[in-house]
Image: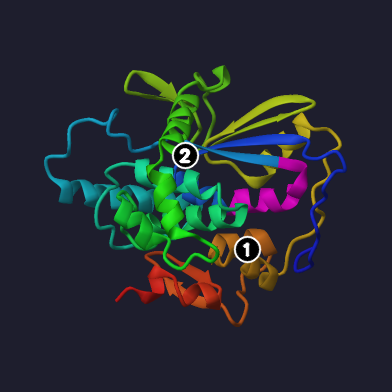
Amino acid sequence: MSGESARPVTPVGGPVVEVVEFTDPACPWAWGSEPTFRRLRYALGGQVAWRRVFGILFDEDEDEDPAPDPDAETRWYRGFIAGIAAHTRAPHTPRLQWVARTSWPASLAAKAAESQSADVAERVLRRLREATFVLGTPADTEDGVLAAVAGVPGLDKPRLLRDMRADATRQAVRRDWTETRRPDHRVLRLDAPGPHGGRAKLVGGRHRYALPTLLLTGPGGRAVVPGWRRYEEYLDAACQVAPGLRPAPGLPCAEEALEGHRSLTEPELELLTGCPDPPARAVRVDTGNGLLWLHPDEARVHPAVLRP
């Protein structure tokens, strides 16, 4: 029920569904899918084990030659993001400074943060997404990453930097790169409706999953849900692979959602709580097409508030 707190179920035997999320910190469709995925993680709680695979959307090894006119490319890509936002309602910056040159630094940081804690990893990845879509300055260098994650609670920044540079982290992201380029056969010739149907992309002579894609595995089998989808489609897929799954029957209140996530877009506020009204203490951040609401503690350290 809207506005009520409902704790997700944790089965005695542990998670019953494995969810693999193929994503990238700079992917506009993945950014637009955050409200849906946050809702899904809340609804399923401890019944799922959620693993992120960083697919490297911007890869220097696959990309074509640099654009002859970077300013024109940036203008075009800003319009591309705005077009996606027309479908997802995700906020986007009106002042994109450049197109991300590479996804590697942000992906290395997101992977490295996982070794600190689940909460830290969530907040680091969120800031990396916001670097592009709220601040307009993609985190495509080490310095850009460190600026984006400034003030994340519980984050050990020196350790993050060391781990970003570690061979083990690079190898882990390289495995993600490979896993993303071995897509399930069902998405190779997919002809799904919608603005982002989810068919595998042919890039650099290899197919890779469209970003984002969820691969769900449970006792009832495996399901793949690629591209831009409604919350109900993901939930149906989870119930298909795990008959008897018990989603939480209600929604968190706005205060609980803000406390847990620290940063909420308007679509997230509506989908997570069933109510468009933010908590009275939320701090407003204007974007090019909507609002971002920050927890007051987050607002004290967030680059969107501190940047002149």
Q: Observer-nearest residue: 149 or 18?
A: 149
Q: Which quadrant is the N terminus positioned in? A: bottom right
Residue at left offset 57%, top offset 67%: 262
Q: Is residue 33 magenta?
A: no
Residue 116's x, y, as percent? Answer: 56, 52
Main SS of residues in magenta? helix
The residue to which callout 2 is attached is 195
Where residue 176 appears, as percent x and y from the top left, is 48, 31
Residue sitting at x 61%, y 52%: 118
Q: Position of residue 12 (x, y in %)?
A: 88, 43
Query: In the shown orientation, is residue 61 left or right of residue 119?
Result: left
Query: Would you name the residue on which mark 1 appears?
Result: 270
| Residue type, mark 1 in image | Glu
Query: Is label 2 in a helix, a strand or a loop?
Result: loop
Image side of residue 222 versus residue 247, left or right: left
For the point 53% across and 41% down, the residue is: 228
Q: Amino acid at mark 2?
A: Pro
Badge 1 element: helix
Horizontal arrangement in the rendering, residue 169 relative to residue 94 (left or right):
right
Foreground: disc 2 or disc 1: 1
The answer to if 40 sits in the magenta stretch is yes
Dot 1, crowdedness within 10 Å: few (<14), some or many (≥20)? some
Dot 2 alpha-carbon crowd within 10 angstroms: few under 14, some 14 to 19, many 20 or more: few
Percent of width and height locating residue 83: 38, 49
Answer above or below: position of 296 versus 121.
Answer: below
Which range of residues does the magenta coloring cover? 35-48
Residue 36 shows in the view: yes
